[in-house]
Image (spheres, rainbow, N blue to C red):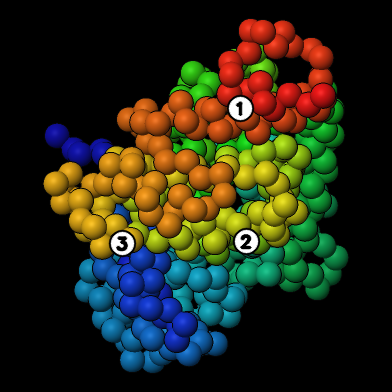
Amino acid sequence: MIDTAPVQPTAVLVAVVTQKQTEEQATEYLNELEFLAETAGIRTLKKFRQKLERPHPRTFVGKGKLEEIQAFVQAEKPTMVIFDDELSSSQMRNLEKELKCKILDRTMLIIEIFLLRAKTVQARTQVELAQMQYMLPRLTRMWTHLSRQQGGVGVRGGPGESELETDRRIVRDKIALLREKLNRIEKQGETQRKSRETMVRVALVGYTNVGKSTLMNLLTKADVFAENKLFATVDATVRKVVIDQIPFLLTDTVGFIRKLPTHLVESFKSTLSEIVEADILLHVVDISHPSFEEQIEVVNKTLAEIGAGDKTVILVLNKIDAYQNPELEDGAPFEEHGGKPTLEQLKATYLNRMPRAVFISAAQKINIDELRQMMMQEIAKKYFSIYPNFLNRDLMPEYLKGEIVG
């Protein structure tokens, strides 16, 4: 019997470690790239890294490391080699020539994952636009299939137009069409958002794969896709929620990541506007991740870049059930809990000194009541400023009565 099962693609991963990075950071960054590859269905065969002051302008890595990678590629025949930074068109061309293998960079890998994950017309259009914008400066003879795909009268230019020039024109035309399509979709979205202006809006934000969709399901009892993979959610999902008489809109948004491609940020501006226009942000953090503090910084930097750095933020420190640490800040061990702290011990750490911080486990439903109360107190402040006399105060829980304005 002939085995017709598809063969899983394989990859070699390559990273340049700069002087500013620690050994732990360099390992973490490559592990994240491996997780990205796994999310795209690619199995990693080997990881290479090299310490350089800056990437080599011609081949990204130095001559000796390139020869080492070349030897492995020739022996093991991986499907592709993936680099943990964005490559220039000349670097990509030189690497393909040297390694005789398909070359991807981090940006293209993330775009590929977004294409796999995008479900709505808007998200797919946004990702296709980012893909075309990424391709345009990198067009070489490898893209001449575009002209053959288009075909028909009027595709070829005048006398003397090269295949590369034709391909560039085709990609520019495609970009123009996608922008026009996205503008139409965004106008419809603006109409929908205007109809929601009288509602308090809350958005879930955070690094990718920190548990936002799991928390969304818990707070809304909705069936939002959640999976232990990067970018499980690409589309913004909006649900109406009512807690303690107070209605509000809760939005689950695309996760941020280190080196999030500029083209994706630009193309997803309409989706990211759900964050910009929100009244309150729930910044979800996976505190079981060894680099969660750096992830917090990445998210805060991205929020500032899109104009949402001044929002009311509740820091939701998630996955406390998976948190492992041999000792507390003051040196008091909690080995009796199998290396895991109790909720009281976590609150004794410096993390609890962050403004509006709450420790939870969305998966295990731990301490969700405290999160709801903290969240509803902030929502109530905004809601009562819009509708000061709308609710029956006698029916309200005690923790909200202090939030009534007037």
Pointers 3 and 1 in contact (C-beta within 8 Å): no
Circle 1 is placed at which residue position?
376
Mark identifier at residue 183: none
- Going from N to C along the chain, the mark reached first, 3 or 2, is 2
The answer to whether residue 136 is left or right of residue 94 is right
Kind of residue indicated by mark 3: Asp
Mark identifier at residue 301: 2
Circle 3 is placed at which residue position?
330
The answer to whether residue 116 is left or right of residue 394 is left
Element class at badge 1:
helix
Residue 184 sits in quarter: top right
Residue visible at 58% across and 32% down in the picture: 375
The answer to whether residue 171 is left or right of residue 363 is right
Q: Nearer the viewer, residue 20 or 342?
A: 342
**Comparing labels 2 and 1, the label whose residue is closer to the camera:** 1
CA distance for labels 3 and 1: 33 Å
The answer to whether residue 188 is left or right of residue 134 is right
Residue visible at 79% across and 47% down in the picture: 179
Picture coordinates of residue 227, whole percent (x, y)? 39, 36
Element class at badge 3:
loop
